[in-house]
């Protein structure tokens, strides 16, 4: 063998082993966020920020494999057994797992935690994900003291019975809402469990002065001996993103939790110095303009399709500095069921004009476009307004606070066009049903809901419901195919103009060891337990 | 004296009641649903309805306000909608930092503003006057956001003299206090200059000069004391402003004050926090006014308790 080749192979092998070497244990990192953390109660907290932080303190029965949307057991010893009718799941807990207070986790803790999410007194945003459990609705309505579908079997067994088979149920069991919490700690916190969280997780919260920082330290008796890698994580809150960026370049902050601030974005991305510190990833969300199917000319399918052809999505992407992937359909690329062959509508103002004329609106019409008032959304709305004007549609812009836009958009026959900016639909869990039921089904076309086009096609609802009954692993390909076809049908009916899928840019310090899968995790964004620092 | 105290206390109570009522009404009239803000976009309409009921938001306005007042009388400001923490706990954790920032800012305002104002008045019409008044104008007009970021970049990042934001000791306090101090100093310098010029043209100053007192003696013994009366009033106003929280400066530096607390609350319509902070600020303002009313006769014997 050639000597140089030998040397080459040896070198390659040694770098390979280096890359595969176990991450350094110990050390600490600091993460900065602009906004305060509101709560760390897993039954209550539900935003991009606290979703990942909660996972430091708590565990659920199920989790996802690192950086993927593939389910894996966590507090459970294995994936649950499913009954032949697809309605009953049996979980077995790992024995010997302890809460931070030293008590062992038992089956009744799981039952308690799920019941707590359903209890109206908890005010859990996740309540409705779990009402498919048998007897849950009766419990919610106060007609039953317990949830009949939840049972502890012995010390470590838990059975969950559903009203009907639901293919997305295991994803729901992997949500933070289903994290296991100890009853005595919730009681001791006297309503403030969100600030005194106590679970089984890889880290313990050790201090949290309001508005300043949260300090987490390693749980020394964590049941997965390899985790976490770090000894300490400090979450600093309240820093202006530009100041946080300066701190990062000086090594005082290791991760910009809110991503790269818009003011520095172009400068940073173009700077070769930072190339190894920046990670981007298309997130599982869709920004869209909703077309209210119950209002005036928008009732006409041809008008909605014409608007889809009138919008120049590339122009919108330029406004956000290219931090998005152009959307052709409704599902984002990382969502199971995404159809790469979907072509959507091509930007074609002439064809849009012709189609409008065919629909009897050759002279266009007047309408209103709602948007939130935070930058860059008004600028994006203006771009949409110009595109509409080019085909004769005169849209006036209503730029308001997010809560006000949500209210108008969720009220029937009120908001004709809504730019979703800032409220783009983001997955609750990686299953296409989550892009259908909450936003595009008849069930969600109600006052205060998020089906802003008020679109309702009973046939599609029925197809989705049938697809959700396909629980067996062998049926999953067929199920995803059916969902792809449902979303293709929706795209033809044009209740939305899907515009882009956001691309998240994360930035880290040089000493932090992490790749994109840890900083842009599709479920928890930042995978704190697997971060490490170079010595 | 006691009658005066009684009537002022009664007035203060009425002000607090009015402040709570107005805030409550304004927030109630917002075309937005706090229950939806708590629940987030993914919650079903049933869940939102259930949360609205648990929060008591499905009751009529007067019922909600009455219940709030009932608890307020017992010293209970309620719990945050979003965090579920008692509002009093949240307020208490923010008062210390807010107080520090207020004291720091007022100290720097006076330290920078008053000497400059005096210098300008004494050199009226000459270059120091023009320069000081120009700077005062710039200081008062500079946007806080820009000023704050510039100071951070220059003094903390470039020259590494101070930490890059955050809360801690005096070194953390200096830059946010300076940001506020520079803005306020502009006003104080102008006020000091015009007051001093007015006082210096009075007859008794001429008398003092005529009897042979030195310029320094005239300034310290006679002029300054009289010129500082309106400054005391301005300090009282500043206390009110700063105790209500200064959103921009707190947000740039990550200072855990009341301003950021209420700003975060407004974005998610967390009514108990919003009303709590307003009532607290109104309380501080009435209190500082009350104090000013008592202090004024001590500085100026011509003012009597009425």
Image (cartoon, coloured by chain):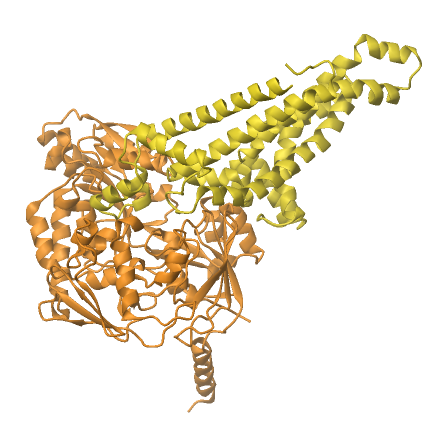
Labels in figure, total: 0
For the colour orange, the matching chain is A
On screen, A348 above or below B125?
A: below
Q: Quadrant of residue A129?
A: bottom left
Determine whether A244 is above or below A311 in the image.
below
Q: A53 above or below A353?
A: below
Residue B195 vs residue A387: left or right?
Answer: right
The residue lying at 67 percent from left, 32 percent from top is B109
Residue A340: in sight, yes or no?
no
Give the residue displayed 40% in from the left and 31% down from the top.
Answer: B69
Residue with the most extreme right position: B212
Q: Position of residue B106 (x, y in %)?
A: 66, 33
Check the picture and name the quadrant holding the N terminus of chain A: bottom left
Q: Residue furthest front?
A: B2
> In the picture, residue A67 is in which quadrant?
bottom left
**Which one is nearer the viewer's eye here, A85 or A287?**
A85
A41 lies left or right of A385: right
Residue B217 in view in this figure: yes
Q: Residue at x 61, y 34 (%)?
A: B180
In percent of width and height, residue A370 lies at 28, 33
Residue A372 in the figure: left or right of residue B110: left
| Along the viewing direction, whichever of A514 and B214 lies nearer the viewer | B214
Quarter assignment of residue B173? top right
Q: Position of residue B50 (x, y in %)?
A: 24, 44
- Viewer-closest of A341 and A90: A90
Query: What is the quadrant of the C terminus of chain A in the image?
Result: bottom right
Between A301 and A111, which is closer to the camera in this rendering?
Answer: A111
- Where is residue A313? Give x, y as percent: 28, 42
Residue found at the very far top of the displayed protein:
B203
Q: Residue furthest bottom?
A: A1
Q: Among the chains, which one is yellow?
A: B
């Amino acid at each position: 063998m050639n000597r140089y080749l030998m040397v080459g192979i040896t070198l390659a092998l040694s770098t390979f082993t280096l890359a595969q070497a176990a991450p350094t244990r110990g050390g600490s990192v600091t993460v900065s966020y602009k906004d305060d953390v509101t709560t760390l109660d897993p039954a209550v907290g539900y935003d991009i920020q606290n979703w990942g932080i909660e996972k430091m303190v708590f565990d659920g029965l199920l989790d996802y494999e690192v950086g993927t949307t593939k389910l894996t057991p966590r507090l459970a010893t294995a994936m649950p057994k499913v009954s032949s009718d697809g309605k009953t799941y049996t979980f077995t807990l790992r024995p010997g797992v302890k809460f931070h207070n030293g008590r062992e986790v038992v089956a009744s803790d799981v039952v308690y935690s799920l019941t707590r999410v359903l209890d109206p007194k908890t005010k859990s945003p996740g309540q409705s994900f779990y009402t498919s459990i048998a007897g849950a609705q009766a419990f919610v309505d106060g007609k039953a003291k317990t949830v009949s579908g939840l049972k502890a079997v012995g010390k470590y067994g838990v059975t969950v019975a559903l009203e009907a088979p639901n293919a997305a149920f295991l994803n729901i069991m992997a949500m933070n809402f289903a994290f296991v919490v100890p009853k005595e700690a919730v009681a001791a916190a006297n309503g403030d469990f969100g600030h005194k969280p106590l679970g089984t997780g890889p880290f313990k919260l050790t201090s949290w002065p309001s508005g300043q920082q949260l300090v987490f330290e390693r749980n020394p008796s964590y049941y997965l001996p390899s985790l976490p890698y770090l000894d300490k994580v400090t979450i600093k809150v309240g820093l202006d993103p530009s100041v946080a960026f300066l701190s990062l370049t000086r090594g005082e902050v290791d991760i910009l939790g809110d991503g790269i601030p818009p003011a520095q974005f172009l400068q940073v991305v173009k700077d070769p110095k930072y190339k190894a510190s920046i990670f981007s990833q298309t997130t599982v969300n869709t920004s869209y303009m909703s077309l209210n199917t119950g209002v005036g000319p928008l009732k006409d399918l041809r008008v909605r399709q014409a608007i889809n052809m009138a919008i120049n999505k590339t122009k919108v992407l330029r406004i956000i500095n290219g931090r998005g992937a152009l959307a052709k359909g409704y599902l984002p690329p990382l969502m199971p069921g995404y159809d790469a062959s979907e072509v959507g509508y091509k930007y074609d103002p002439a064809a849009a004009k012709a189609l409008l004329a065919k629909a009897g609106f050759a002279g266009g019409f007047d309408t209103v476009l709602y948007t939130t008032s935070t930058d860059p959304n008004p600028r994006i709305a203006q771009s949409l307004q110009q595109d509409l004007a080019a085909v004769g549609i005169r849209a006036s812009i209503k730029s308001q606070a997010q809560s006000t836009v949500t209210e108008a958009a969720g009220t029937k026959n009120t908001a004709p066009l809504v730019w979703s900016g800032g409220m783009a639909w983001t997955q609750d869990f990686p299953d296409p049903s989550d892009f259908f039921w909450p936003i595009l089904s008849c069930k969600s076309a109600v006052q205060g809901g998020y089906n802003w086009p008020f679109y309702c096609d009973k046939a599609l609802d029925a197809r989705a419901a049938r697809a959700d009954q396909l629980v067996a692993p062998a049926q999953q390909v067929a199920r995803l195919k059916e969902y792809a076809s449902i979303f293709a049908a929706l795209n033809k009916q044009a209740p939305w103009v899907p515009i882009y899928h956001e691309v998240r840019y994360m930035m880290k310090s040089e000493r932090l060891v992490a790749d994109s899968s840890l900083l842009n995790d599709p479920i928890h964004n930042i995978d704190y337990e697997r971060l490490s620092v170079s010595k | 004296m006691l009658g005066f105290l009684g009537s002022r206390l009664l007035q203060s109570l009425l002000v607090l009641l009015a402040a709570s009522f107005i805030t409550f009404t304004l927030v109630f009239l917002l075309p937005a649903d706090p229950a939806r803000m708590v629940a987030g976009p993914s919650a079903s309409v049933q869940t939102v309805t259930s949360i609205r009921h648990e929060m008591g938001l499905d009751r009529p306005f007067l019922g909600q306000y009455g219940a709030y007042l009932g608890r307020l009388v017992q010293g209970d400001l309620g719990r945050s909608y979003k965090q579920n923490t008692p509002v009093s706990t949240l307020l208490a954790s923010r008062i210390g930092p807010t107080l520090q920032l207020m004291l720091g800012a007022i100290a720097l305002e006076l330290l920078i503003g008053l000497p400059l104002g005096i210098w300008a008045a004494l050199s009226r019409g000459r270059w120091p006057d023009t320069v000081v008044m120009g700077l005062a104008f710039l200081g008062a007009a500079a946007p806080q956001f820009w000023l704050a970021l510039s100071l951070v970049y220059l003094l903390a990042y470039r020259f590494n003299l101070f930490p890059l934001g955050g809360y801690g000791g005096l070194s953390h306090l200096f830059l946010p206090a300076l940001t506020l101090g520079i803005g306020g100093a502009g006003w104080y310098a102008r006020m000091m200059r015009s007051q001093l010029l007015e006082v210096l043209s009075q007859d008794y100053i001429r008398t003092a000069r005529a009897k042979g007192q030195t310029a320094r003696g005239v300034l310290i013994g006679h002029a300054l004391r009289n010129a500082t009366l309106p400054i005391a009033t301005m300090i009282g106003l500043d206390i009110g402003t700063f105790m209500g929280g200064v959103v921009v400066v707190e947000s740039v530096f990550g200072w855990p004050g009341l301003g950021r607390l209420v700003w975060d609350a407004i974005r998610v319509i967390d009514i108990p926090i919003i009303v709590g902070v307003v009532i607290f600020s109104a309380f501080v303002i009435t209190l500082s006014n009350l104090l000013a009313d008592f202090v004024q006769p001590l500085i100026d014997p011509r003012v009597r308790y009425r």
